[in-house]
Image: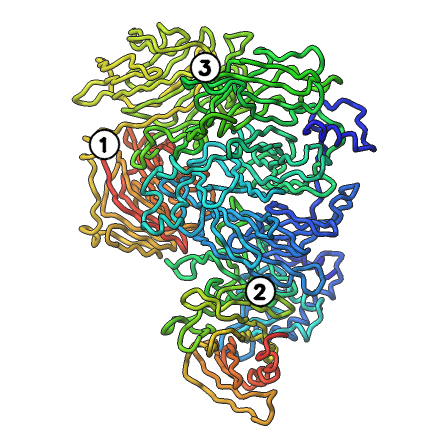
């Protein structure tokens, strides 16, 4: 049926009868860009169509633009004019009875031109019954309409519970999907979404919502929304009747009981290599005019700048389906909208989110009529054998349909059908790697007689897993290559047998508790977003053993591994120095590969493609063989302590793949030096999921001197225009520019710790070795507190006169406590001075003042930078060296 | 042509220099316009030391800074509309457009070079008619809360009204440039930056703040829930529902904002109407003692009587005989103001122009 539609669509296009064999996406789909007026930046959040064919486009800038003649043969003949500005974002738009409805952050509004001059005169609030606390991440998305004229919308959670990037729901209905009836009544419908940037209603009134990877969201999912269902991000549970009645907050119980029982599984998990930031989706109802079988879905994708194609099916009462790329190289596609002639309008934007160029604008994607060779669709197959008495089940499988017969000569086999399954962790970490990846043994792989259908079966196929199927060498009879050779399918349920209660994203046992947050843990899962490592010649990609040459890797686009594939690649080295620590690393070696993990003070753990040698330490082989084989990921954990005055250095434990291979090794000649941790490969090595957790010794805490402000407040000095007040347990500073001087003096080699926060657009600093300061100048090392004020030096930046080492990423949100540590060391008086700043135990900035220009001993001061600043300070301590 | 000449002025390093090809009489035209219209207050040299007896000194152009923006557009606006609450009159009806343009460029050129700042790409200006903007405004007072659901109403004359949408409470009036949409940077969702200066803020009084229209159901206060806005030339309507303590919708109404021209100076006037299902629904203005009572002949229904109170400096409150409450934001109560109100009474009380 699907096949017929695809072919019929191509044949129906009389004027564009295919003459050449489409070899690339560009042969199948043209991409054109609309010309925008001068000064117009279209950051598209919503698209709708009037009955006369004009479009209305709402943007993140709160503007609404009208596009006349959007289907003009020459795209230059389309004209874009401003209809309205002044809304607070417009991340969804609907046109109902030829009137414009836009969802703003705080309301759904109807926009009307009363006098016919082409500009909006009247805005009517249709609905606004939800909370806006003021956090930047509280986006509101919409605005599809169902057959009963109800609108559908979704609300982001804000951030900051407990870490800055963890979801938070402080006002109703952050993290919910809502239904808005035509009279504006808002009905909270489903709970547990995180950043649900896409929402669609299909021809059967099914509501689909896309979400973005983050805490509790393993990758980018597409949910089929059901009333009162919970989709996984727990913080929004605050607004359910159950939680409201109990007075409990969702973050008191992580993960909540709802996570294990009663969670609704996404219909599709989009693999991370295809989507890192998903936009909206629509059901194609053009009757094949877009070259896509009617009833399939087109999905917008920002980061990789493309559109994808998806299909859903119901299996044992649960929705699940498949997805694969459709057309790449469009730009950061946030919104897709289909015209009656099949043309797909793509609205772009990626400001602050990141994504492929172009970053904004409006595109039109049209089917050229040249039918490609594609996997048209995929459906799960029941097992021919029923479940046996001892619980063994049969070989479940899939049927793939091709858009045209496969050329003679290609027969499916293990050589050209790559069939794997995987699942995810469900946890509070940001996203999840694919877990439990397993190659599936093919029980059957057969092509139908007409060569348009492929059946694959395996006894290994499990429910609550995702499947990735890759075909090599498939062409059409005309020689067109399979345009997209990989398809992913999410199996929530198998077609028969007992229904599973498991989820693709599984609660990780034991679930990480909130007490064991990532404070102090240096993590590297996918790339190095916080600049924690130094390296050259490493790339982020998917890697696996090359089947033809097992001494090397095959690399493909993805984020699964860090590989030292460049010429003269360096070691991968932490910027920060560590003393005692727990180091976790996953690594993969090719045949004959070698490498090592170099630890400060205790030396190297050798890595080698050899069960006898991998894990060798200090000349001692591993006590048991734990290494598996080349091409497998290996998990290594090392717990060690550097030497201290009264105790030698120790390697407490080395664990490889869960087996302890060394224990309790004392190192005689260690010096106690802290240092960086290095990961080295002699040849190729692949790394992933690096974690370094410093293991502070409790004895150190005793050496800290607490600065008791309430006891010494009379000795604290105010200079300048800021006001600093001493409260119950904190000091609150309010700007204009001014300083608060503590009574501390003559600090030289010192570590200072304080718990601090600053408001949105406020800024301040903690100054170590501060001395005599005129109002606009200071001496000493100032560490900035600044979450959002746009002067390029955010929290963690170091400044001392001309010396400037800014932090440009917003690591800490406004109004959020952070444990700040500043370490200043001058080994030789008046000489080179090193300043190290850590936030929540993670080193974020280290700079050297080469001539010690600012190295003079001094006091400790706090500074408010400008009007409107509110900074808070608690728990000030220091330790001299 | 004039504009071109003046751009040359502005761009010439080291101060105003006439381009060799520009007709010199244009510059002297601007100068004679200045001498005729501006010098009596601002001084012949632009030093702010004119001969007129003012209750506050006029702006010195030599210092460069301008109260309400130093862009060409902002200065033109000040000349056209005057500056409400100050002696600066409006010249919009007495001078021609090109004369105003020439004057603006002349006074800008009196200042130090490089003081003209091109508006950033995120700066919103009000065009020929008012603009209603939705967004989050920063806290008005130090340590106060920012206002995530604000309505900012900008008028072409540079006056901006900031409302809290949930309650309909007027929070500030500003004068100057309009808004910097700081939320157009980064990921968005951040505060708007008002570019004008606060010229009036409500003061707290018992049960609320002055300068507000309070909807009442008998003695029970009702909450205003914002329902939309409408703009026309020089006029803005803010529509609202009236909601009781149980969240029940008991009626609706609108606040109407416009400007009266009083002695060539624009004066902001706000009125409010309501209707509803609730018994005894009415709108009150926030308090103050009467400073004057005005009575109009009962025989002429087009001219109802009203009483005037002065809740705080810069504000007069009045209630018409038919119950319509009105606020006028003016420095003092003058005969001209009174006549302007009389002339506009019908409109003010109808609110549906």
Could you tell me residue A503's position as x and y percent? 44, 30
**Mark 3 or 1 closer to N-term?**
3
Instruction: Classify mark 1: helix, strand or loop.
Output: loop
Instruction: Classify mark 3: helix, strand or loop.
Output: loop
In this figure, which residue is indicated by the disc labeled 2?
A: B229
Q: Are marks 3 and 1 on the same chain?
A: yes
Q: Are marks 2 and 3 on the same chain?
A: no
From the viewer's perspective, is the residue at label 2 or at label 3 nearer?
Answer: 2
In this view, the residue farthest toward the left is A646
Q: Residues within 10 Å of mark 2 (few under 14, many from 20)?
A: many
Q: Is residue A231 visible?
A: yes
| Marks 3 and 1, how far apart at CA | 40 Å
Q: Is residue B336 above or below residue B35?
A: below
In this figure, which residue is indicated by the disc labeled 3?
A: A685
Q: Residues within 10 Å of mark 3 (few under 14, many from 20)?
A: many
In the rendered structure, the residue with mark 2 lies on which chain? B
In this figure, which residue is indicated by the disc labeled 1?
A: A881
Q: Is residue B311 above or below residue A596?
A: below
Mark identifier at residue B238: none
Which quadrant holds residue A121? bottom right
**Residue drawn at (61%, 53%) of the image:** A63
From the viewer's perspective, is the residue at label 3 or at label 1 nearer?
Answer: 3
Q: Is residue B62 visible?
A: no
Could you tell me residue A641's position as x and y percent? 25, 21
From the viewer's perspective, is the residue at label 1 or at label 2 nearer?
Answer: 2
Q: Are marks 3 and 1 in contact (CB under 8 Å)?
A: no
């Amino acid at each position: 049926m699907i096949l017929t539609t695809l072919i019929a669509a191509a044949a129906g296009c009389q004027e564009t009868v295919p003459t050449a064999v489409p070899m690339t996406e560009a042969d199948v789909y043209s991409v054109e860009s609309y010309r925008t007026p001068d000064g117009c930046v279209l950051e598209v959040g919503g698209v709708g169509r009037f009955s006369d064919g004009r479009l209305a486009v709402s943007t993140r800038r709160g503007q609404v633009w009208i596009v006349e003649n959007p289907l003009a043969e020459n795209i230059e003949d389309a004209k874009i004019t401003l209809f309205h500005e002044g809304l607070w974002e417009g991340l969804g738009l609907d046109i109902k009875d030829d009137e414009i409805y836009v969802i703003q952050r705080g309301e759904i509004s109807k926009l009307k031109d009363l006098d016919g001059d082409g500009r909006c005169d009247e805005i009517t609030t249709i609905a606004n019954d939800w909370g806006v606390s003021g956090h930047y991440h509280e986006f509101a998305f919409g605005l599809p309409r169902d057959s009963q004229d109800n609108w559908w919308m979704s609300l982001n959670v804000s951030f900051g519970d407990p870490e800055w990037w963890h979801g938070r729901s402080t006002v109703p209905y952050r993290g919910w999907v809502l239904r808005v009836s035509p009279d504006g009544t808002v009905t909270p419908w489903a709970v547990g979404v995180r950043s649900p940037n896409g929402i669609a209603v299909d021809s059967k009134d099914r509501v689909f919502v896309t979400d973005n990877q983050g805490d509790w969201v393993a990758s980018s999912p597409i949910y089929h929304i059901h009333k009162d269902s919970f989709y996984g991000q727990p913080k929004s549970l605050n607004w359910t009747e159950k939680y409201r009645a109990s007075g409990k907050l969702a973050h008191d119980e992580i993960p909540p009981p709802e996570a294990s029982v009663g969670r609704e599984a996404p219909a599709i998990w989009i693999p991370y290599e295809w989507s890192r930031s998903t936009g909206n989706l629509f059901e194609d109802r053009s009757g094949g005019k877009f070259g896509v079988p009617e009833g399939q879905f087109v999905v917008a994708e920002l980061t990789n700048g493309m559109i994808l194609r998806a299909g859903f099916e119901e299996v044992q009462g649960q929705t699940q389906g498949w997805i694969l790329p459709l057309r790449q190289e469009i730009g950061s596609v946030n919104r897709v909208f289909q015209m009656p002639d099949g043309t797909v309008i793509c609205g772009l934007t990626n400001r602050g989110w990141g994504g492929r160029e172009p970053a904004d604008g409006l595109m039109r994607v049209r089917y050229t009529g040249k039918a490609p060779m594609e996997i048209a669709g995929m459906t799960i197959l029941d097992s021919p054998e029923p479940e046996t008495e001892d619980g063994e089940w049969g070989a479940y499988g899939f049927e793939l349909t091709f858009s045209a017969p496969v050329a003679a000569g290609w027969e499916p086999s293990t050589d050209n059908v790559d069939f794997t399954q995987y699942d995810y962790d469900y946890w509070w970490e940001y996203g999840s790697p694919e877990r439990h990846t397993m190659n599936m043994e093919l029980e059957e792989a057969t092509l139908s007689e007409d060569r348009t259908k492929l059946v694959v079966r395996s006894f290994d196929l499990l429910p609550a897993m995702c499947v990735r199927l890759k075909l090599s060498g498939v062409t059409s009879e005309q020689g067109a290559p399979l345009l997209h050779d990989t398809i992913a399918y999410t199996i929530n349920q198998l077609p028969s047998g007992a229904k599973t209660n498991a989820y693709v994203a599984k609660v990780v046992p034991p679930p990480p508790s909130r007490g064991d947050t990532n404070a102090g843990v240096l993590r590297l899962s996918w790339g190095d977003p916080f600049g924690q490592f130094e390296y050259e010649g490493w790339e982020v990609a998917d890697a696996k053993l090359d089947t033809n040459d097992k001494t090397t890797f095959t690399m493909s686009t993805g984020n699964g591994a860090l590989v030292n594939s460049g010429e003269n690649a360096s070691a991968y080295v932490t910027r920060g120095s560590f003393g005692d620590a727990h180091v976790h690393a996953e690594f993969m070696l090719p045949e004959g590969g070698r490498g090592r993990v170099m630890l400060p003070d205790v030396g190297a753990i050798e890595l080698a493609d050899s069960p006898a040698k991998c894990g060798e330490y200090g000349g001692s082989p591993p006590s048991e063989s734990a290494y598996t084989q080349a091409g497998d990921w290996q998990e290594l954990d090392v717990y060690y302590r550097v030497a201290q005055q009264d105790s030698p250095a120790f390697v407490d434990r080395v664990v490889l793949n869960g087996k302890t291979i060394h224990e309790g090794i004392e190192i005689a000649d260690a010096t106690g030096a802290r240092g960086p941790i290095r990961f080295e490969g002699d040849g190729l090595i692949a790394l992933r999921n690096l974690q370094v957790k410093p293991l502070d010794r409790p004895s150190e805490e005793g050496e800290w001197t607490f600065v008791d402000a309430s006891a010494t407040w009379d000795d604290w000095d105010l200079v300048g225009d800021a006001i600093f007040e001493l409260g119950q347990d904190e000091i609150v500073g309010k700007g204009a520019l001014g300083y608060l001087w503590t009574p501390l003096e003559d600090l030289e080699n010192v570590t200072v710790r304080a718990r601090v926060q600053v408001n949105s657009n406020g800024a301040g600093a903690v100054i170590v070795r501060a001395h005599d300061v005129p109002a606009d100048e200071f001496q000493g090392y100032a560490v900035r507190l600044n979450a959002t004020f746009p002067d390029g030096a955010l929290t963690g930046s170091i400044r001392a006169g001309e010396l400037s080492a800014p932090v440009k990423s917003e690591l800490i949100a406004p109004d959020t406590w952070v444990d700040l540590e500043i370490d200043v060391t001058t080994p030789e008086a008046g000489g080179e001075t090193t300043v190290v700043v850590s936030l929540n135990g993670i080193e974020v900035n280290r700079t050297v003042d080469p001539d010690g220009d600012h190295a003079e001993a001094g006091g400790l001061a706090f500074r408010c930078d400008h009007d409107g600043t509110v900074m808070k300070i608690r728990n000030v301590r220091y330790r001299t060296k | 042509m004039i504009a071109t000449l003046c751009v040359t002025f502005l761009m010439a390093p080291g101060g105003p220099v006439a381009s060799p090809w520009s007709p010199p009489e244009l510059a002297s035209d601007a100068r004679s316009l200045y001498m005729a219209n501006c010098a009596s207050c601002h001084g012949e040299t632009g030093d702010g030391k004119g001969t007129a007896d003012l209750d506050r000194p006029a702006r010195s152009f030599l210092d460069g800074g301008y109260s309400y923006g130093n862009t060409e557009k902002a200065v033109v606006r000040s000349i056209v509309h005057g500056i409400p609450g100050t002696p600066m009159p409006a010249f919009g009806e007495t001078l021609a457009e090109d004369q105003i343009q020439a004057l603006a460029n002349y006074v800008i050129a009196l200042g130090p070079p490089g003081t003209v700042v091109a508006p950033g790409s995120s700066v919103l200006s009000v065009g020929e008619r008012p603009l209603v903007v939705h967004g989050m405004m920063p806290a008005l007072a130090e340590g106060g809360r920012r206002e995530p659901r604000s309505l900012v109403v900008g008028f072409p004359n540079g006056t901006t009204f900031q409302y809290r949408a949930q309650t309909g409470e007027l929070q500030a009036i500003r004068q100057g440039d309009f808004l910097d949409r700081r939320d157009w940077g980064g990921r968005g969702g951040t505060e708007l930056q008002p570019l004008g200066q606060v010229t009036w803020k409500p003061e707290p009084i018992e049960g609320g703040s002055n300068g507000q229209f309070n909807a009442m159901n008998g003695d029970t206060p009702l909450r205003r829930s914002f329902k939309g806005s409408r703009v026309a030339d020089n006029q803005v309507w803010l529509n609202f529902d009236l909601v009781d303590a149980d969240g029940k919708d008991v009626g609706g109404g609108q606040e109407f904002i416009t400007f009266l021209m009083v002695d060539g100076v624009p004066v902001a006037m706000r009125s409010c109407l309501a209707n509803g299902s609730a018994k005894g629904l009415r709108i009150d203005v926030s308090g103050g003692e009467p400073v004057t009572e005005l009575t109009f002949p009962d025989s002429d229904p087009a001219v109802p009587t009203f009483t005037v109170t002065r809740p705080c400096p810069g504000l007069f409150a009045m209630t018409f005989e038919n119950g319509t409450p009105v606020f006028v934001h003016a420095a003092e109560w003058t005969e001209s103001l009174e006549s302007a109100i009389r002339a506009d009474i019908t409109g003010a009380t109808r609110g549906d122009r």
